[in-house]
Amino acid sequence: MFRVLVFGLFHETHCFLRGSTGLRDFEFMEGPAILNVRGESSPLGGFLEYADQQGWDVVPTLFATAVPGPMVEAEVFEHYWSRFEEIATSCLATGVDAIFAILHGAFVCSHQCDVDGEVLRRIRSLPGALSIPMFGVYDLHANYSQSMAMNADCLVGYRENPHTDARESAMRAAALLSRALSDRKRPRQVLKQVPVLLPPTATASRAQPMKRLLELARSLEKKHSSFWAMNVNAGFAYADTPDTGLSFSIVTDGDEDEAQKALNQLTELAMEHLEDCTSVLESMEQVFHRLMGMQRSGGIPGLTVLVEPSDNIGAGAPGNGTALLQAMVEYEIANGAICLWAPMAVKLLSKHQPGDVVLLEFESSGVKNNDLPLFIECKLLRLCDGLFEIEDKQSHLASMSGDHFNMGQCAIVTHRGVVIFLTSNRTPPMDLGQWRHVGLAPEKFSVLVVKAAVAHRKAYDPIAARQIWVDTPGPCSSNLKSFAYKKIRRPMFPLDDIVR
Ligand SMILES: [Zn+2]
């Protein structure tokens, strides 16, 4: 029976946001508690299921995760490492056959740009860890580093965005580990970083440029029997590090040349279509004039989802931007709805009764060139608890948090016909269970604002008559030239002109 040590360290870090992500924001699971997520839809759940099927003896160590957000404090990583080192050292001393990692790939600390690569490097330095295979799974939005390539034998990325395949990818990685253990083979990884930075709005796996890159990766994988896995890493544009950007990695037991040639093919394909690597969104004025026109000529048919990537919670934004709320009120949109992160407003409302009219203050805290806070009178409909079961166990949200998500205490209020759903915890809009849990039917609204770029689509595509991506001020703007990059490698499209 193989003994496999498992650990996880998971964060997507937005370096341009105000504030920081601290220990208070992280959820830690240690030792046997990790085994309790058996059956869940997360990558960890997928690994545990595969391990059970194989009869592996899983050695659970330490798992830490937080919702995407601002720069992580150095203390978080060092706290994690000191505890992990203690647990892992004693486990390794009793004999372990392999290590399995669950990572994101875009974790940045104030003292360490490449936390994912650094944790793998440190693990390799522990007694007994160099001689055993280290495999793992990571997110498609990874800023894949040389240290990740050098210090692991085989890392497998998700292939879908929205991330419907997180659990499946972990099982794919575990199956490759099983092959390494039974064949006593150790593959290695070859990485190619490309001078292209994709805004999250351009990283959907069913749209270009990702679609054709993923297709080529699948066909190269089939053609070369030495390739164990090929990864297309979209990168995470708001992590400002030397590794940020699009990259490709190959896990191979063949020769270096063969891998480099395949990586070059992918690179050429990406560079031939730079026009697909940016996205230009419609202005609020354009969008609302269109909606007004529809409203005047008999009403807006079906549900219109207004997608607001600049306040994309799944990419670290606060989810409290009020620009679209104000526009819905100003343009007198009937039957509109928006969900906002507003812990202070919920706290104030918790002292009130349904029916009370309360003056609420809304602050758009993540936004550069911040507007003044918005003060509006709202009528409280009800207060609700926020722990909900995720409806779609293959949703992007399940890839991050397993089967449940806690929005904290919630309040439903209205203001001039707009329903405002307030949460205490930042809640990425990736599962409709969020609305139904608080007694709202999202498909019944005419206009509904979603603070996401792509990850919401599996949930909202089936109920939306149309979706419109709107340009609003916010920290996850698709205009990457508006960010003051300091550490990213140059030249980098679209920040620089790339001569091909
Ligand atoms: Zn992702």
Image: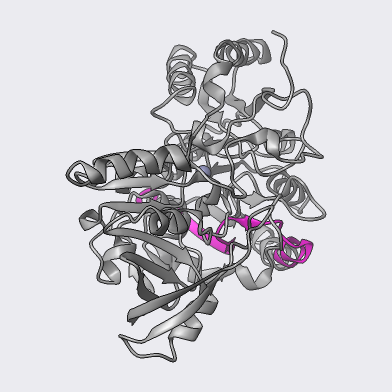
What's the image's color scheme?
Answer: one colour
Would you say residue 73 sits in the magenta stretch? yes
Tell me residue 4's x, y (percent): 54, 52
Tell me residue 173's x, y (percent): 48, 39
The quadrant in which residue 417 appears is bottom left
Front one among 28 and 348? 348
Residue 463 as seen in the image, left or right of residue 332: left
Magenta-colored span: 53-80
| Quadrant that contains the C terminus | top right
Front one among 125 and 136? 136
Q: Is residue 203 above or below residue 316?
A: above
Residue 479 as seen in the image, left or right of residue 450: right
Q: Is residue 181 visible?
A: yes
Q: Is residue 404 above or below residue 457?
A: below
Q: Is residue 39 visible?
A: no
Tell me residue 96's x, y (percent): 60, 53
